[in-house]
């Protein structure tokens, strides 16, 4: 019996039974369709990446490698394409193209006369090319497969709710939280308190019911099993120590292998990587980097995700650098000036983002008075006017095993997070306070220059208001992420300074603690405005933000936020993110405004561009 046939039928059976089955049940159901032995089934399950195996404690049949109560969970590496949902995918990606709301069973266009802008065809040519096995799956079966593998589809469980005492734990958004308030251990199947647990064990309580109200009935009915499957796939390590995660695990963020009967690790891996990171080298000992071969054997380099695709707390990503070769054979990184050569208007970050969006695409840029086109397919740049061509190379930034150890040791230490490692805290902060606490509000002295600067900014448009106090928000984690974001935006702009402003935001007092702790969440803090896009709204004038402040005991509260507005464009109510910059195929604006020539309202879609700096209590 062909193992592919056994795999496809087994995957379909699992997806039609809530995404998982015990080994004994799967074997019994499978034998009604195919003639398959225990040996064949076990060999297929262990060889395929379509199944997560959670060993049981029960007995084994004679000759079987798996116990009867072993849990088998349908697993897939594909995800719903986020760029497709933003209408920015070029169609050559390796992810599923489907309407998210159709998948969840609540697309409002499913039964109406209006046609949805996103595909409802699960068996489209693109989807079949990405995951051929879905040809055998029904709509409901594919839905189950994606829901228990793609963590972006279902609401996230609130980690703050699962810490601390009280009805809401330490979640400061409380009943307004858009995440699920449910016991994480219960969902993972490991809660030892049972019915006496102080955390919620029901998806139908007020918070969860509101968050999940748009899910179709069959999805909601199987929700607990779906979450348990998801966590098993994500976190489970069996007792024999062999990780069942379908991703590669290794001690370094790269792995060099040679193919014989199977893929085997190469010796001197760190030296091979060091050679590969040098753009002037095409070989390392017997390895040809251009052809990725050694003799007649195929070579491969496995790697962590590109740094441009992950947020700052992903410390072990791969930073890819882009180089061009000058007439003297010297390799020069894009965006940097070398000798008499002018710096290119594009950078490694910009090129990496464009390359990941379309590896066969082209990017136009300038260097001094010259115009160029870089072809990813040909890996060369061409002078538009005189036709001169130069070779281009994409190579990673080298990281040794020692560098890796230092990064891991420094992870989570104050001032040592991600690429902001080593940054000092702001000079005006109270350094006597423990920086390990989540955040602290520190009252600013009225006699200080700091107070006067904030007061002047506020009273420029609020002259008749009386400030009761100004408090500084000291949240090191948010500050480090903000500084990291500033660095990324600076690199993306070729080293040019990023436009940064102090702007106002009026809100309900009940959200103040949550914002200080977790930053602004547009789904809660931006509910009053969508005219220029779905993001968090900030104002140049305090008088404008005053309209959105809610009084509390006769006083009002307003935030002064430090915001990286960068390059902006006029917004539109349909925007879920800023649009592409004029003439660009990969570079987006940083924010949206109400009026480009005289902006007074700014819409921010990425919360890393915001730091909640001050809280002003005042009476109008």
Image (cartoon, rainbow, N blue to C red):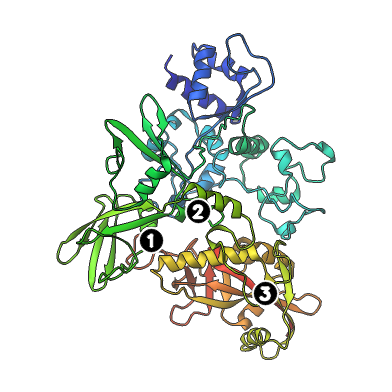
Q: Would you identify the image quadrant in which residue 350 lies?
A: bottom left
Secondary element at image label 2: loop
Whether residue 527 can be seen here: no
Q: Picture coordinates of residue 437 (x, y %)?
A: 72, 62
Q: What residue is rendered at 39% in x and 40% in y?
A: 301
Q: As drawn, is 566 to the left or to the right of 583? A: right
Q: Which residue is mark 3?
A: 429
Q: Picture coordinates of residue 616 (x, y %)?
A: 70, 79
The crowding category of the residue bearing disc 2, from other C-alpha atoms within 10 Å (few below 14, some 14 to 19, many at least 20), is: few
Whether residue 170 can be seen here: yes
Q: What residue is rendered at 37% in x and 50% in y?
A: 277
Q: Picture coordinates of residue 558 (x, y %)?
A: 68, 76
In this view, the residue farthest toward the top is: 62
Residue 310 is tagged as 2
C-alpha span from label 2 to label 1: 15 Å
Image quadrant containing the C terminus: bottom right
Secondary element at image label 3: loop
Q: As drawn, is 358 to the left or to the right of 4? A: left
In this view, the residue farthest toward the right is: 196
Residue 173 is tagged as none
The crowding category of the residue bearing disc 3, from other C-alpha atoms within 10 Å (few below 14, some 14 to 19, many at least 20), is: few
Q: Which residue is mark 1?
A: 350
Q: Would you identify the image quadrant in which residue 563 lies?
A: bottom right
Q: What residue is rendered at 80% in x and 80% in y?
A: 554
Residue 174 vs 385, above or below: the answer is above
Q: Would you identify the image quadrant in which residue 389 lies?
A: bottom left
Image quadrant containing the N terminus: top left
Q: Nearer the viewer, mark 1 or mark 3?
A: 3
Are the residues tagged 2 and 1 within 8 Å (C-beta)?
Answer: no
Q: Nearer the viewer, residue 599 or 439?
A: 439
């Amino acid at each position: 019996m062909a193992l592919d046939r056994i795999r496809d039928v087994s995957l379909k059976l699992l997806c039609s039974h809530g995404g998982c089955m015990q080994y004994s049940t799967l074997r019994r159901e499978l034998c009604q369709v195919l003639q398959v032995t225990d040996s064949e089934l076990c060999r297929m399950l262990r060889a395929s990446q379509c199944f997560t195996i959670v060993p049981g404690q029960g007995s084994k049949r004679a000759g079987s490698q798996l116990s009867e109560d072993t849990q088998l969970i349908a697993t897939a590496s594909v995800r719903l394409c986020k760029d497709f949902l933003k209408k920015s995918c070029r169609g050559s990606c390796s992810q599923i193209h489907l309407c998210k709301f159709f998948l969840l069973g609540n697309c409002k266009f499913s039964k109406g006369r209006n046609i949805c802008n996103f595909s409802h065809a699960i068996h489209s040519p693109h989807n079949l090319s990405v995951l051929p096995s879905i040809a055998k799956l029904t709509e409901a079966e594919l839905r189950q497969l994606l829901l228990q593998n793609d963590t972006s589809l279902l609401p996230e469980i609130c980690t703050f709710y699962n810490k601390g005492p009280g009805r809401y734990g330490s979640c400061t958004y409380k009943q307004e939280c858009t995440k699920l308030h449910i016991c994480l251990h219960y969902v993972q199947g490991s809660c030892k308190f049972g019915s006496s647990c102080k955390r919620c064990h029901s998806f139908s309580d007020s918070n969860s019911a509101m968050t999940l109200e748009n899910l179709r009935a069959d999805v909601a009915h199987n929700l607990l099993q779906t979450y348990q499957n998801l966590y098993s796939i994500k976190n489970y390590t069996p007792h024999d120590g062999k990780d069942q995660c379908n991703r590669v695990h290794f001690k370094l963020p790269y792995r060099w292998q040679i193919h014989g009967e199977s893929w085997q690790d190469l010796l001197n891996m760190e030296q091979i990587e060091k050679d590969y990171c040098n753009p002037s080298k095409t070989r390392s000992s017997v390895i040809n980097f251009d052809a990725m071969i050694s003799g007649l054997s195929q070579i491969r380099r496995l790697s962590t995700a590109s740094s441009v695709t992950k947020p700052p707390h992903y410390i072990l990503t791969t930073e890819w650098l882009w180089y061009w070769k000058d007439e003297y054979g010297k390799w020069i990184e894009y965006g940097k000036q070398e000798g008499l050569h002018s710096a290119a208007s594009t950078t490694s970050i910009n090129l990496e983002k464009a390359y990941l969006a379309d590896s066969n695409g082209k990017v136009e840029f300038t260097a001094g008075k010259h115009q160029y086109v870089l072809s990813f397919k040909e890996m060369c740049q061409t002078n538009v006017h005189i036709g001169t061509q130069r070779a281009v190379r994409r190579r990673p930034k080298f990281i040794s095993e020692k560098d890796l150890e230092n990064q891991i040791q420094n992870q989570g230490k104050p001032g040592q997070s991600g690429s902001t490692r080593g940054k000092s805290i702001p000079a005006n902060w109270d350094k006597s306070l423990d920086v390990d606490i989540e955040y602290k509000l520190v009252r600013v002295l009225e006699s200080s220059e700091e107070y006067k600067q904030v007061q002047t900014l506020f009273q420029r448009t609020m002259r008749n208001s009386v400030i009761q106090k100004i408090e500084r928000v000291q949240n090191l984690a948010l500050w480090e992420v903000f500084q990291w974001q500033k660095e990324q935006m600076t690199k993306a702009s070729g080293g040019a300074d990023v436009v940064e402003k102090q702007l106002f935001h009026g809100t309900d007092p009940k959200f103040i603690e949550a914002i200080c702790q977790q930053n602004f969440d547009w789904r809660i803090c931006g509910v009053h405005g969508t005219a220029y896009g779905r993001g968090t709204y900030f104002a140049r004038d305090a008088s404008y933000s005053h309209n959105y402040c809610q009084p509390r005991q006769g006083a009002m509260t307003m935030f002064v936020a430090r915001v990286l507005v960068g390059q902006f464009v006029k917004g539109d109510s349909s925007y879920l993110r800023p649009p592409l910059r004029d003439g660009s195929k990969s570079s987006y604006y940083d924010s949206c405004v109400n009026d480009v020539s005289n902006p007074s309202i700014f819409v921010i879609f990425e919360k890393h561009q915001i730091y909640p700096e001050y809280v002003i209590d005042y009476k109008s």
